Amino acid sequence: MTNRRKTRTVMVGPVEVGGNAPISIQSMTNTHTDDIETTVKQIHELEALKCNIIRVAVPDVKTVKCLGEIKKRINIPLVADIHFGHNLAIEAIKQGVDKIRINPGNMKKKDKLEEIVHLAKDKGIPIRIGVNSGSIRSNNGHEEDLVKLMVKTTLRYCEHFESLGFKDIVVSLKASDVQKTMDAYRSIAKQCDYPLHLGITAAGAPDDAIIKSAIGIGGMLSEGIGDTLRVSFTGPPHQEIKAGYKILEALALSKRTDAEIISCPTCGRCEIDLLNIVNEVKKRLSSQKKSVQIAVMGCIVNGPGEAMEADIGIAGGKGVGFLFKKGEKIRKIPESEMVSTLLEEIETI
């Protein structure tokens, strides 16, 4: 993997973003923020999944007045997502949030922006300049190249903020088009040292969004670009956290805290019911939190090698399999005992 891009460090509450800090994982509630009980309950659920930073929508004055109470009842940094109204950003900062996100596509008045920046500087609150392709396009037509437009707009805002002595800036440049998003991040990464918040916007339902995010977010991280991320799913946010950690784990940027199952793609050489075995093992391990790699392989081509490299593995043959543990071949077991044997061996680790 490419060495990670060097950035300045920005503190979001107690969470360090950028510099040498671990990649942090964010999400956004899908509750009505003025429903404090439901919002806090969902944030607690996301905290339990190891969400590092949480963002809430702030559409109106009624909502922004709830932020202080929400902040008091949660344990992770709270970010206010602000669009259009600079007065909402001002009040969110006064409510004690840990960061605000503003969108250059819908907040353009220079004097109002400066009021936000001065107050954020006084309170020590960072700002994410979050460019979204849809809002940028709706205000600028379709003539200019989208990537150039996103980067130019973001840097113009950053320069304005810097001219006011404000440096606690995080930026994001999100589009629903994966390639354009990646191009925008690559471009801005060469032109500044701000921490970058990664994501693909409007990525869709989970089965589509996970593919787009794995390519876009994972691709950027593999190039050393990115300091914090959100995997955006249509629906409840809980799966976003799980997907984010899976992307980090796949790139060895986060230590696994659960079991990883490696299994082959079941070609015509497979002579055991591999899919049912894998599904049963996965189901019975769902409540356990063991950092263990398990290989369940269906034939002798790649099976023995993969099984030897895993913590525990089975290389299948016709109705039987050989058990491997920590690189050593242990014994032959019948297909009917594969699941129970794997679970028993996992318990010994």
Image (cartoon, helix red, strand yellow):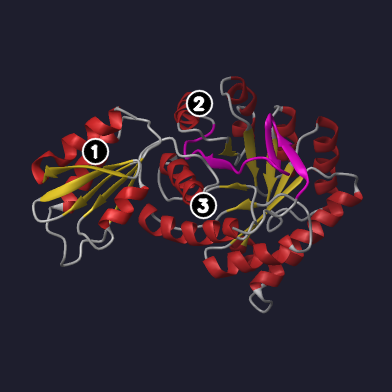
Magenta stretch contains residue 210: no
Residue 99, x across and y down, in percent: 69, 37
Amino acid type, callout 1: Lys
The magenta segment is 7-33
Q: Note whether 184 is above or below 309 in the view shown.
A: below
Give residue 77's quadrant in the image.
top right
- Decide which of tag 2 and tag 1 comes sooner along the chain: 2
Quadrant of the drawing holding the C terminus = top left
The residue that disc 3 covers is 251
| Cα distance between the residues tagged 3 and 1 | 24 Å
Dot label at residue 283? 1
**Residue 262 seen:** no
Is mark 2 in CB contact (under 8 Å) with mark 3?
A: no
Give residue 116's quadrant in the image.
top right
Dot label at residue 233? none
Q: Note whether 90 is above or below 182 in the view shown.
A: above
Q: Which residue is drawn at 62% across and 25% down?
A: 71
On screen, residue 146 versus residue 243, left or right, reads: right
Q: Callout 1: helix, strand or loop?
A: helix
Q: Which residue is drawn at 53% across and 61% down?
A: 216
Dot label at residue 40? 2
- Decide which of tag 2 and tag 3 comes sooner along the chain: 2
| Cα distance between the residues tagged 2 and 1 | 30 Å
Q: Which residue is drawn at 61% across and 39% down?
A: 58
- Decide which of tag 3 and tag 1 comes sooner along the chain: 3
Amino acid type, callout 3: Leu
Q: Residue at x 64, y 53 (%)?
A: 226
